[in-house]
């Protein structure tokens, strides 16, 4: 898409009408990932021409300019090899740093999905793989802190331990963990699936070096974020002067509020909002202190293998977590909201199209989103057809309508459409940027699409 001006303009000419016609507020570019000198140059040219077209179109029709954001990687090689950071930053309103997936089933030793800091047991190279290091790299390479929106995950990355007696970070693993009942992907669990494990006997471990938790259940190892680690990260964002936080995704938090305990819908994202924007929860909505609710290794010798958790039907589980005996184990003291909280901090929330196709209690539709949970909602993903911005499936028009309808509950909510993603790959972007006509056409049709 970005290699020549012709292709870039094809895209641009399609993007503007696409966005305007569907009442989106902007476009989120998720190219995973530009690589090499040509891609690095062409991505900048694409962003430049999109921004210029968005500016001109807004002036002509006298409407607010369409926002332009991008989701960007954290791997040092990907960042240095694919991004002219000062140039990219100059054209984007916000840079959504995907500060997760640092470790996963592609490795043969356990590692946390999103450690704030790397553990001391990491090799020198692996010590680059942390939220703190990744954000610092983008700043070092020229990104303004106020434009950096730091990614949070409402899911965990899982491993199968090679030896259950060795279960700390960097322990041998044979591959990813078992697929979840709802997300159905090996090596990956939504937060509500993780809560089910913790309520069914999994051992909870807080790692004070990484400032994040993980769990162990038999030979299953899961690195994830809970309310405690999310609040720590929000304080780190505020102290560091970053622009806010982004979350992947709304639909993998405990959106029903009936699984994890604490009587909180969206416990992770609402903790983000509370810390960054000072919007307090209701008095009966509590953080779950998993160190008190779940099992710990203090309960038994470390070398003893825990039995596999007892499987409880979801209906029984929901009754269980609502019982007073369980709620009594929940920490009743809310974290104090920072009086100097920056109410202008951004909370970007991604919502996936495929969440509506999950089975049973995992099914989630855009109309279920709390419209006041986030400052920006990003629908993932649109696609390219003939180098033009397009719906990815026949279900998208209805999904778009549900998303846009959220503005009736919160007129200040900014709604963006994301294009790309890991499954989309890099090739379509390379082809789109291969000539000027294609990119021009994309930009202008995209604006019409979003409108």
Image: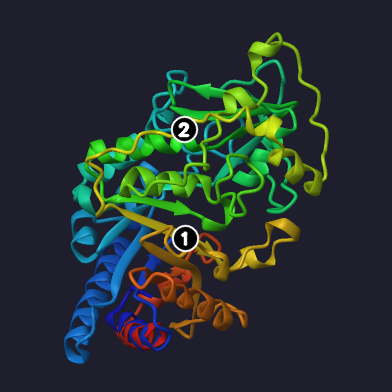
Q: Residue at x 58, y 30 (%)?
A: 330
Task: Please tell me how crowded label 1 is: few (under 14), some (14-19), or many (20+) other residues with Cα within 10 Å.
Answer: many
* Helix, strand or loop for disc 2: helix
Residue 323 % position (x, y): 72, 37
Give the residue at mark 1: 350
Q: Residue furthest top?
A: 301
Res. 190 in view: no
Which coloring applies here?
Answer: rainbow
Of callouts 2 and 1, the N-terminal one: 2
**Does the CB distance between marks 2 and 1 fall below 8 Å?**
no
Asked if 177 appears above or below 353 in the picture, the reply is above
Image quarter in which the C terminus is found: bottom left
Seen in the image, is 240 located left or right of residue 311? left
Q: Nearer the viewer, residue 29 or 438?
A: 29
Residue 10 % position (x, y): 35, 86
- Residue 274: quarter of image: top left
Asked if 319 appears above or below 8 in the picture, the reply is above
The numbered dot on residue 228 is: 2
Task: Please tell me how crowded label 2 is: few (under 14), some (14-19), or many (20+) other residues with Cα within 10 Å.
Answer: some
Which mark is nearer the camera, 2 or 1? 2
Image quarter in which the N terminus is found: bottom left
């Amino acid at each position: 898409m970005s290699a020549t001006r012709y292709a870039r303009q094809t895209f641009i000419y399609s993007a503007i009408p696409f966005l305007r016609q569907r009442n989106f507020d902007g476009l989120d570019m998720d190219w995973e990932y530009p690589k090499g000198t040509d891609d690095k140059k062409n991505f900048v040219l694409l962003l430049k021409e999109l921004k210029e077209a968005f500016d001109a179109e807004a002036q002509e029709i006298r409407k607010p300019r369409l926002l332009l954001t991008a989701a960007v990687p954290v791997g040092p090689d990907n960042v240095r090899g694919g991004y002219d950071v000062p140039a990219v930053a100059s054209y984007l309103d916000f840079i959504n740093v995907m500060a997760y997936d640092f470790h996963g089933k592609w490795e043969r030793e356990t590692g946390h999905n999103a450690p704030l800091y790397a553990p001391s047991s990491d090799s020198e190279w692996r010590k680059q793989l942390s939220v703190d290091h990744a954000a610092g790299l983008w700043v070092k390479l020229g990104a303004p802190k106020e434009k950096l929106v730091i990614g949070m995950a409402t899911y965990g990355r899982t491993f199968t331990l090679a030896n259950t007696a060795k279960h700390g970070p960097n322990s041998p693993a044979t591959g990813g963990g078992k697929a979840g009942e709802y997300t159905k992907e090996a090596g990956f669990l939504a937060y509500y699936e993780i809560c089910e494990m913790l309520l069914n006997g999994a051992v909870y471990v807080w790692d004070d070096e990484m400032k994040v938790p993980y769990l162990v259940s038999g030979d299953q190892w899961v690195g994830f974020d809970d309310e405690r680690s999310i609040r720590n990260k929000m304080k780190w964002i505020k102290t560091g002067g970053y622009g806010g936080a982004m979350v992947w995704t709304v639909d993998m938090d405990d959106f029903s509020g009936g699984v994890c305990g604490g009587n909180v819908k969206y416990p992770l994202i609402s903790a983000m909002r509370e810390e960054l924007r000072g919007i307090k929860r209701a008095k009966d909505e509590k953080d779950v202190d998993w160190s008190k609710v779940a099992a710990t290794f203090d309960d038994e010798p470390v070398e003893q293998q825990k039995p596999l958790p007892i499987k409880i039907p979801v209906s029984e589980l929901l009754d269980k977590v609502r019982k007073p005996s369980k709620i009594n184990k929940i920490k009743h003291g809310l974290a104090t909201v920072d009086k100097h909280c920056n109410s202008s901090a951004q909370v970007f929330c991604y919502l996936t199209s495929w969440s509506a196709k999950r089975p049973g209690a995992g099914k989630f539709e855009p109309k279920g989103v709390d419209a006041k949970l986030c400052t920006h909602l990003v629908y993932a993903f649109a696609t390219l057809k003939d180098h033009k911005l397009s719906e990815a499936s026949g279900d998208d028009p209805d999904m778009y309508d549900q998303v846009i309808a959220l503005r009736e509950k919160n007129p200040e909510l900014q709604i963006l459409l994301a294009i790309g993603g890991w499954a989309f790959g890099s090739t379509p972007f390379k082809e789109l940027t291969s000539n000027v006509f294609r990119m021009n056409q994309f930009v202008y049709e995209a604006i019409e699409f979003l409108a």
